[in-house]
Image: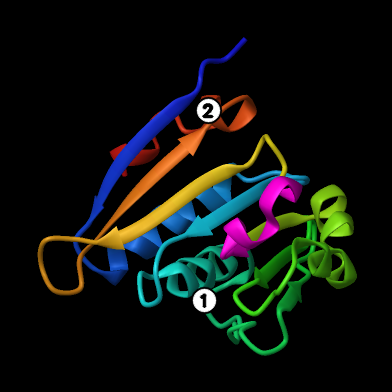
Amino acid sequence: MIAARELLVALPDEAATARLAARLALRARQGDVIALAGPLGSGKTSFARAFIRACGGAATEVPSPTFTLVEIYAFAGKPPVWHFDLYRLRAPEEALELGIEEAWGDGISLIEWPERLGALLPAGHLLLALAEGRDPGARTARLAAAGAWAERLQGIADG
């Protein structure tokens, strides 16, 4: 059994956030859930955009799902990426109406505001918690995983 793994990664600028997102996109598989936590303005949507562009190309248009609550991206030869923004949910069960269970089976799920899911959040998810760094524009990312994600995080901070 793979032990749980937790990493802290310094992200001095948005380019570093994009590089981390691209490294995680290379490791992501069908059925993966990546929970993007952090306060407003911490970089969750920027991370998601970089992840999606790493899957589909730099020119991929990636609107924020703040108002639509979910955006789905299909790429040839890869599982679809479902980008959820659950900030406006009033109850965890509302996520079921968005097709979140389908996403968990068929695609890769990026979930902003995962705490809104409560007990519905799958146990095997990767948590990526973003926070402000020491310098303006800098962030820190705390990655916490168990199971399959714990193994795949090996070397992720090495660039």
Residue 11 against residue 56 in the figure, above or below: above
Q: Which residue is mark 2?
A: 150
Residue 131 horizontal/vertical position (percent)? 30, 60
Point out which mark residue 16 bears.
Answer: none
Dominant SS in magenta: helix
Q: Tag 1: residue type?
A: Ala
Q: Which residue is mark 1?
A: 58
Q: SS of the residue at dot 2? A: helix
Q: Earlier in the sequence, mark 1 or mark 2?
A: 1
Q: Nearest the camera: 22 or 139?
A: 139
Q: Determine whether, in the image, residue 151 is placed left or right of residue 17.
A: right
Tell which residue pokes out farthest to the top in this image.
1
Residue 109 against residue 89 in the figure, above or below: above
Q: SS of the residue at dot 1? A: loop
Q: Residues within 10 Å of mark 1 (few under 14, many from 20)?
A: few
Q: Which residue is painted at 39% across and 68% down in the image? A: 39
Q: Nearest the camera: 1 or 61?
A: 1
Residue 83 against residue 103 in the figure, above or below: below
